[in-house]
Image (cartoon, helix red, strand yellow):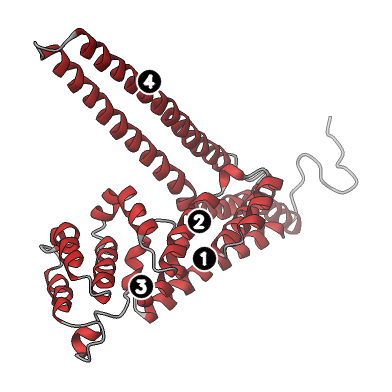
């Protein structure tokens, strides 16, 4: 028995009209491309998250290396002391007891350092895990919520760069994103910059000591510039004997790689601080006066990715870097606007 066609003419054997087919195709394509478009936005967004993962991971590695070196040094010293006591034939019983008691106290100190180091490592590992989980939670379904958290991260980052640390901390706490931001990194950078502004190189040199391997790997000359500054200040104060001793201890190791600068600055020993000789008068001007602007502009921007190499930038290069930073922020904001629509 033949089935009658439905009132709209769309029976099982009826032909589909061109208009209906076109509409159906359009709906299908739209439904397929919408998730694809969101995923494309998500992929591009994740490309900007390199520093988001790199900063805590670098701190994690640094903490592990520091703990390893500290424990290795202390344990070696204890073993050496035990060996000396064991090999000593004429040591008295009281002296042996005193030495062993001292070693016990030292071992307790090592244990305390191990516990503190383990706690620091766990904190850094937890921060890395929290950020990985945050990135892993991004998908097409909750993209709006994920981008909302991301916007708050950007705001905290911006406030930190502008030195609004209290506001940044309050926003991070109210949004429960403390483990997703790096306020502590910016605070550490601020200590270095404030020290330089006050003509104090101590904090900067301490930072160089903590990041010696990274500076060496990137062939940075920032520590050398700091050492030059201290030498110049001694010469400016006409404290020549201390300047010579300082140069022998801290500048001579740089002679092989920075010979011309080393020779030029050493020549200032033959001139007074008020010399009119143009060539060496420049060397006796405080070096940090020429570096502070670039340090304050880019210290936090580079987030310790050898940000001191930016001190060598020319004015146009600085402008280009600022433009690149602004373009990056514009891209993020446009991305958020597109998702909101």
Distance in Å between CA atoms under marks 2 and 3? 20 Å
Residue annotated with mark 4: 108
Residue 13 location, quadrant: top right
Residue annotated with mark 3: 288
Residue 120 visible in the picture: yes
| Neighbours of disc 2 within 10 Å: few (<14), some (14-19), many (20+) | many
Q: In the image, residue 12 lies at what x, y percent?
A: 77, 39
The label on residue 186 is: 2
Which label's residue is closer to the chain start, 2 or 1? 2
Q: Residue at x 87, y 49 (%)?
A: 8
Distance in Å between CA atoms under marks 1 and 4? 50 Å
The label on residue 328 is: 1
Which label's residue is closer to the chain start, 4 or 2? 4
Distance in Å between CA atoms under marks 3 and 4? 44 Å
- Name the front one of labels 1 and 3: 3
Drawn side of residue 93 relative to residue 20, left or right: left
In the rendered image, the vertical position of residue 12 relative to residue 112, given as above or below: below
Question: Tag 1, which secondary structure?
Answer: helix
Observer-nearest of 149 and 226: 226
The answer to whether the residues at label 4 and label 2 have Cβ atoms under 8 Å apart is no
Observer-nearest of 206 and 328: 206
Distance in Å between CA atoms under marks 4 and 2? 34 Å
Q: Which residue is outermost to the top?
A: 93
Q: Residue at x 26, y 57 (%)?
A: 218
- Name the front one of labels 4 and 2: 4
Q: Residue at x 39, y 45 (%)?
A: 58
| Neighbours of disc 3 within 10 Å: few (<14), some (14-19), many (20+) | some
């Amino acid at each position: 028995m033949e089935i009658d066609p439905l009132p709209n003419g769309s029976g099982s054997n009826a032909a589909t009209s061109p208009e209906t087919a076109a509409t159906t195709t359009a709906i299908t394509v739209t439904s397929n491309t919408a998730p694809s478009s969101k995923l494309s936005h998500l992929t591009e967004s994740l490309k900007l998250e390199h520093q988001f993962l790199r900063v805590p991971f670098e701190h994690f590695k640094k903490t592990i290396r520091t703990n390893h070196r500290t424990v290795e040094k202390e344990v070696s010293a204890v073993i050496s002391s035990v060996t000396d006591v064991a090999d000593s034939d004429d040591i008295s019983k009281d002296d042996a007891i005193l030495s062993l008691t001292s070693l016990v106290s030292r071992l307790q100190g090592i244990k305390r350092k191990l516990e503190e180091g383990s706690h620091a490592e766990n904190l850094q590992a937890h921060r890395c895990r929290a950020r990985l989980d945050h990135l892993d939670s991004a998908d097409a379904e909750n993209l709006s919520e994920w981008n909302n958290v991301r916007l708050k991260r950007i705001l905290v980052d911006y406030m930190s760069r502008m030195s609004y640390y209290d506001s940044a901390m309050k926003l991070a706490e109210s949004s429960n994103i403390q483990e997703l931001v790096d306020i502590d990194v910016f605070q550490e950078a601020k200590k270095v910059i404030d020290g330089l502004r006050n003509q104090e190189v101590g904090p900067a040199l301490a930072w160089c000591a903590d990041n010696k391997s990274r500076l060496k790997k990137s062939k940075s000359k920032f520590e050398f510039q700091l050492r030059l500054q201290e030498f110049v200040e001694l010469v400016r104060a006409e404290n020549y004997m201390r300047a010579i001793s300082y140069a022998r201890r801290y500048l001579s190791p740089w002679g092989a790689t920075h010979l011309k600068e080393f020779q030029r600055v050493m020549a200032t020993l033959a001139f007074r601080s008020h010399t009119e000789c143009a060539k060496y008068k420049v060397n006796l001007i405080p070096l940090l006066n020429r570096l502070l602007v670039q340090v304050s502009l880019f210290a936090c921007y580079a987030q310790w990715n050898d940000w001191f190499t930016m001190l060598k930038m020319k004015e146009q290069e600085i402008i280009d870097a600022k433009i690149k930073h602004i373009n990056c922020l514009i891209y993020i904001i446009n991305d958020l606007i597109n998702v909101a629509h």
